[in-house]
Image (cartoon, rainbow, N blue to C red):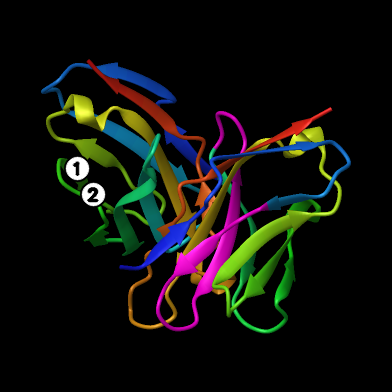
Amino acid sequence: AQSVAQPEDQVNVAEGNPLTVKCTYSVSGNPYLFWYVQYPNRGLQFLLKYITGDNLVKGSYGFEAEFNKSQTSFHLKKPSALVSDSALYFCAVRPHYGNNRKLIWGLGTSLAVNP
Amino acid sequence: DAGITQSPRYKITETGRQVTLMCHQTWSHSYMFWYRQDLGHGLRLIYYSAAADITDKGEVPDGYVVSRSKTENFPLTLESATRSQTSVYFCASSDPGQGYEKLFFGSGTQLSVL
C-alpha cells in the first residue's frame, strides 16, 4: 500500500538552531512531493513541492526540502528556526502514475521552537 | 475579501440531525475538496470535485453528500450526523494552472455531534 510516514510526532528545537522535519514515502514510480504547514486554528498552507529536477527545493518562509530517491525521503529543513515557525507540518505525496489525483498525507509533525 | 471561506466556524449538533457545511471560493478554481482532520488520522479526503457538476468520492465518503452546482460553492452535508463525525472539516481548492496539488485551504469548521 502507498503511504507517507512522518516518524516524529513532535520536534523541539531552540530558536536560531537548524531544524529538520522528516518524511519518508512508499509510492510506486516517481512521486510528486509536498510540504504544508498548519498554524493553530488555521487551515493548511502550501510550503513547497518537488516535481523533478534539483533535489533541493526552496519554499516559503525560508524553508527548503531535500529529495532523496534512494532513501525515499523528503525532509523539510530550515537553517535557523524562529519561534513563529512553531506549527504542525504535513508531508504529502501524489503518485506520478495513473489518473489518481488524490494526495496521500502524513499524520503531521508538531514543531515547537523554544525561545 | 478574496479567498476561500467556510461557514460556520463552529457547529454543535445532535445525532441524527442533518448538517450542511458551506464552502465558497472567489478564485474560480476548478478543483475543490473536503477533508476531515482527526487526531491520529491526519487529513482524510471525503469528497472532491473537478468542476461544476462533477464530484467523486474520497477515502471516507460514507454519511456525507456533496453538490457543486456552481464553480464557487461546494457544500458538504451530513445527512444524519453521528458522533464519529465529530471532527474539524476543511475545504480546499486548487487550480490546475498553478499545480493541481497546490491546495488553498479554508480556516475550517469545528463540528461537534452530541
> In which quadrant will I find the C terminus of chain B?
top left
| Residues marked 2 and 1 touching at CB (< 8 Å) | yes
Residue A63 image point, x, y percent: 76, 56
Q: Is residue B51 above or below residue A19?
A: below
Instruction: Name the quadrant containing residue B17.
Output: top left
- Towards the viewer: A66 or B109: A66
Residue depicted at x 54% and y 72% = A72
Residue B72 image point, x, y percent: 41, 51
Q: Which residue is mark 1?
A: B64
Residue depicted at x 19% and y 42% = B64
Whether residue B65 is visible here, answered yes or no, is yes
Q: Secondary structure at mark 2?
A: loop
Q: Is residue B85 above or below residue A32?
A: above
Chain identity of mark 1: B
Magenta stretch? A21-42
Q: Secondary structure at mark 1?
A: strand
